Image (spheres, rainbow, N blue to C red):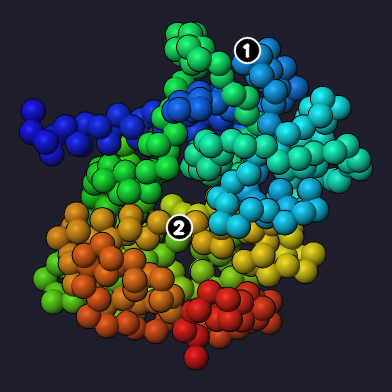
Amino acid sequence: MSADHATAERVRSSLRQIHRGASDLRRGVPVILSGPSPLLIMAAETAGTGGLEELESVSGSEIVLILAPARAAAILRAPMPAHADAVAVTLPSSLRKIDVFQTLVDPTAAQLPVRETMKLAAEPAAAAALRLAKIGRLLPAVVAAALPEGSATRLAGHGIIEVPASEVLDYASDEVAGLRQIVSAHVPLNGAPDSRVVAFRTEGSAIEHLAIVIGRPQDRAAPLVRVHSECFTGDLLGSLRCDCGEQLRGAIARMAEDGAGVLLYLAQEGRGIGLINKLRAYELQDRGLDTMDANRVLGWGADERNFLVGAAMLQNMGIRRVRLLTNNPDKLEAMEACGIEVAGREPHLFAANGVNDEYLATKASRFGHMLD
């Protein structure tokens, strides 16, 4: 077996395990996070009362709650360690109830008074635990218990999936390496009849990224390309809270006028946090937070997208030099970082509509979008 083939097999195997682990967390099933300090984890959002009892009885260890630093700081009312990606919080037995967990992990949930003392705990695998929850598009909050030596193998024998913590942390690069083109079909569009849709999927995942290809961009020296993250509310419903629908339809119209182009439609809703979490962020925005702070209060980063997925899709289609239709400097950097030459940037501006004015202002002031 060649080295390249062995690497590809390792990536495929890793991705299958990670995606199954993320799926189990969504179903409220425990997952073993293996490594030097193995953990038995469950997503706080889906654990349920029975799940918490099972976690404690199976592990025989004290339960901790793993949170993003911003969320931990809010519930502990104390600053978190600098540069921490995740923190573990010890919980007294009186707090190990599902309704209390919902109060602690979800800032949009009805708040219950919590007077018991909680404190930070050391947990080396905390960052990997949160990352797995994020891959499952769940709230970044995990209940966990340390596993005694030898017990991980025993539990894996009873059907509990085992996912290496180190591979979870490498997921972003493996996701790109495991991306494959699945099918291409002619799909005439209104205003762009010479178009097709090319579907991509990462090994072991139900998530599908699409490329809307207009004309023959591969014949152009630098075709027009847009990297567009899916937006159910804006693209499909015509929401006024964002400018995504206008950007989508405007990009297709520009490419049809230009004669060719590619719109990469990435399954990274809400800057990568998923639709349900985006709706939670909307609720927090209605309470006065901007887009960036709402994501952070939920425990997510300001932008969780992996733009390298888009670059890999272009390379798969034989396109390595583009004119990028964007206002976002991060997309320019991501394309260049993955070997796509950006021959130029084409601005993609739409006027505020009276509802999304603050949203667009935040894009400019806090995300650095070029909207002038």
The amino acid at mark 1 is: Val
Query: For the residues marked 1 and 2, what is the alpha-carbon distance in whole angstroms?
Result: 35 Å
Q: Is residue 30 above or below residue 350?
A: above
Mark 2 lies on residue: 305
**Tag 2: amino acid:** Arg
Q: Residue shown at 71%/48% (left/top)?
A: 72
Q: Are circles 1 and 2 on residues that touch, CB within 8 Å?
A: no
Q: Report helix, strand or loop for mark 1.
A: helix
Query: In the visual, does 120 lie left or right of 185?
Result: right
The N terminus is located in which quarter? Answer: top left
Label 1 crowd bin: few (<14), some (14–19), many (20+), radius 10 Å = few
Q: Residue at x 19, y 54 (%)?
A: 316
Counting from the top left corner in percent of width and height, residue 302 is at 56, 62
As drawn, 359 above or below 116:
below
Q: Which residue lies under the disc numbered 1?
A: 58
Q: Nearer the viewer, residue 51 or 225?
A: 51
Q: Position of residue 249 (x, y in %)?
A: 43, 71
Q: Quadrant of residue 25?
A: top right
